Image (spheres, coloured by chain):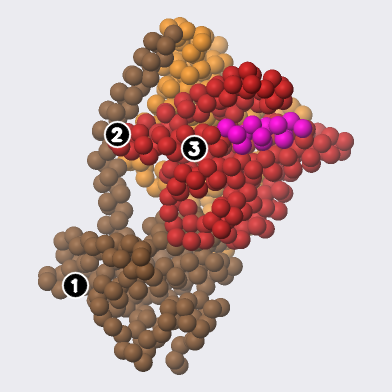
Chain colours: A orange, B brown, C red
Amino acid sequence: MTKLELIKKGLIKDNPTFVLVLGMCPTLGTTTSALNGMGMGLATLVVLTLSNIVISAVARYIPDKVRIPSYIVIISAFVTIIQLLMQAYLPSLYETLGLFIPLIVVNCIVLGRAEAFANKNTVLDSACDGLGIGLGFTLSLTVIGLIREILGAGTFFGWHFLGGDGILVFILAPGAFLVLGLLMALFNKLTGRA
Amino acid sequence: MLISLGGIALVCALLLAVVNALTEKKIAKVQADKTAAAIAQVVPAFDGSPVDTVVLVDAQEYLVHKAMAGDSIVGYAIETATAGFGGPINMMVGFSASGEIYSTAVVSHSETPGLGAKITDGESHFRTQFEHKNPADGYNLSVTKDGGDVDAITASTITSRAFTLAVAKAYDVYLSVAGAQPAPEFFEPQDGEGGSDD
Amino acid sequence: MTIFLILISAIFVNNIVLAQFLGICPFLGVSKQVNTAVGMSLAVTFVMALATCVTWLLQYYVLVPLNMVYMQTVTFILVIAGLVQMVEIILKKISPALYQSLGIFLPLITTNCAVLGVALMVVQKQFSFGGEAHMLNLGESVVFAIASAIGFGLAITLMAAIREQLETSDVPKPFRGVPIALITAGIMALAFMGFSGMV
């Protein structure tokens, strides 16, 4: 597979949200608007790419017995770095995403890619894989956030195109489940996976 | 086996210590800027930086920022926290030297988006109705449903009550700091039932 | 009274799954049968209470005095992973019967974000529970953890009961599996919104 194909497969074929059904907590919890979803997706993308790179580089030196704890330490170190940087330079986004930033540690996508891809591939391939899956995740979260924002608040990336408030329930907790459920069914229908 | 795990942990800890040292000052500054911005928003224009004091009212500590212009006090910004609908609401409530509510700012909250979260909208009627009102002149700080003068946000009575309570608490703190006793005939208990005098 | 308010708040009003979106993976993955859902909830309750207790102590007696709060995420997840391993080994030795029923769920709990989520929440956020906003003390934190776990158990058990019924109904093809589960969860979340404002 070429590098470009590696990146591309994360977008549709191996889309982490709609195909692999991983990382559901941030997908539901942070998509109250397109920008929030995009911010969460990008934070995950950075952690995923960096941890993929480091893990693919050091994997062969780590004994099998302490493999998982070592990966967790590496991933949580990158998560903390992102967390500190966001607190310093993107404080309002950090406040909105809140608990879901440290929780990237337990996002199954990150540990999943380390186990399934990074520990048996080259550094460059792992970086591409991380980028691709990260972009797929960011794309899904942005789309879900956008749909919830349009329906629930009557805004488009924060721009008010509607006089009123929109259908509030789509911004609230039930809307997250309903929108994701319906989108997933639509995705199944369109890709003929059903 | 333990050596490699320990090594990884050590490298990561060192890396984090470095990043922490690099961002620590900036994060502290972001916090300080946020407080400073909230103070500037709720009191009239002032010189230099506000003077901070801790005040004890009803066995509860409050942080009061006194805004000075020259030698005279132009306003008080008081930090309060109350229990809202979804969790605590942290606020900065500003009074001018004469004791009227100058403005309010919501520092943090976890109210429902689209409903209670409207308290963050400084332009809304709910927020502007407090401005330039003086509780000493009989402005009753409780929502109309409870017999007061504050119009609650539609469908968000609990949030509106919490917000109003925060302003009322801040007023108590203001009274104890400024020592400005209101004229007795206008003085009403904070959770009194009666409406306004007119 | 506070304990009662914490319980109501964490189980119904701010249900960890349906209102805060934590622990969604096991909520969708281990909710096909009521039996397994109950087993999972018991294991989560045990680990969550224990983990919150240990991480709370670690936060206030190690990280804060040493000025190393930035190591929070790293140490908390390692503690949780270690605890889960330990519980597994002890359970295997002491009660093979219990291990038989709960053992399979234990490895899954390390990556249950509800456990790390609750441990982080009690040391990062102020809670009000109808009174003054404050940081939770050790006792309140453990009660909050147990209450959150009960909330998780309630949501996952209800979900499993509904999904057992769904098995026999004719769901349109694209909706089968996760999509219909999500829509069910959405309707449950709507119902749980009825509790909001109670505490």
Determine if marks 3 and 2 fall on one subunit: yes
Disc 3 marks a residue whose amino acid type is Cys
**What is the x, y in percent for residue B94?**
31, 69
Number of residues whose C-alpha sits closer than 10 Å to that of mark 2, classed few (under 14), some (14–19) or many (20 or more): few
- Residue type pointed to by label 2: Leu
Residue at image location 47% in from the left, 34% down from the top: C54
Query: Is label 3 in a helix, a strand or a loop?
Result: helix
Residue A46 seen in the figure: no
* Residue under pointer 3: C53
Q: Residue at x 34, y 78 (%)?
A: B132
Cα separation between marks 3 and 1: 47 Å
Element type at marker 2?
loop
In the image, residue C45 lies in the stretch drawn in magenta: yes
Q: Is residue A120 above or below residue C167?
A: above
User: Visible in this render: residue B71?
Assistant: yes
- Residue C179 found in image quarter: top right
Q: CA distance from mark 3 to mark 2?
A: 19 Å
Q: Is residue C188 left or right of residue C8?
A: right
Q: Mark 3 against mark 2, which lies toward the viewer?
A: 3
| Magenta span of residues | C35-47
Prevalent SS, magenta region = helix
Q: Is residue B5 above or below residue B38?
A: above
Number of residues whose C-alpha sits closer than 10 Å to that of mark 3, classed few (under 14), some (14–19) or many (20 or more)? some
- Residue at label 2? C66
Chain hosting mark 2:
C
Task: State the residue position of label 1.
Answer: B73
Q: Secondary structure at mark 1?
A: strand
Circle nearer the N terminus (3, 2): 3
Chain for numbered disc 1: B
